[in-house]
Image (cartoon, helix red, strand yellow):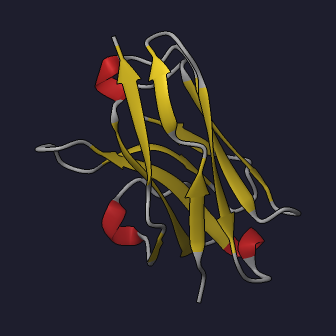
Amino acid sequence: QVQLVESGGGLVQAGGSLRLSCAASGRTFSSYAMGWFRQAPGKERECVAAISWSGGSTYSADSVKGRFTISRDNLKNTVYLQMNSLKPEDTALYYCAADRYLGFPLVVGLEYDYWGQGTQVTVSS
């Protein structure tokens, strides 16, 4: 069982930056693929970034490529999402997710077994 707790969300002006963190419980964090998803009101959930168990492979959605960076620290059981050049359309509830998988980054929500409660990101124009 893995518990995930997100932090770092908030209100920021367009063009600003935020860094989301997701702290995971358990001693096998390094065996888990991790992902960041977001869902805005009236829209489907989408994967914005994902990272393999080792951190050696990452995925970024086209909508955030060049602006968002996912990383992980397996010693701290934490995955991060650095968000730069934020836009109003980035406003959403952001979730981290985990799945015990020693392969490439997972980008489909159904592939993940564990989810955090989410942290709100609001970007004002």
| Number of numbered callouts drawn | 0
Residue extending furthest toward the right: 75
Tell me the quarter of the image containing the C terminus.
top left
Tell me the quarter of the image containing the N terminus.
bottom right
x and y percentages locating residue 85 in the rendered image: 52, 13
Residue extending furthest toward the front: 11
x and y percentages locating residue 88 in the rendered image: 32, 19
Residue 71 visible = yes
x and y percentages locating residue 25 in the rendered image: 70, 78
Above or below, comparing residue 64 to residue 37 in the picture: above
Which residue shows up at 60% across the image and 82% down it?
2
Left or right, residue 45 beside residue 6: left
Left or right, residue 114 beside residue 56: left
x and y percentages locating residue 57 in the rendered image: 65, 46
Which residue shows up at 46% across the image and 29% down it?
11
Above or below, comparing residue 2 to residue 60 in the picture: below
Left or right, residue 73 beside residue 51: right
Res 53 → quadrant:
bottom right
Residue extending furthest toward the bottom: 1
Which residue shows up at 58% across the image and 70% down it?
4
Res 77 → quadrant:
bottom right
In the image shown, does 4 or 71 lie closer to the viewer?
4
Which residue shows up at 39% across the image and 23% down it?
123
Above or below, comparing residue 49 to residue 113 in the picture: above
Residue 103 visible = no
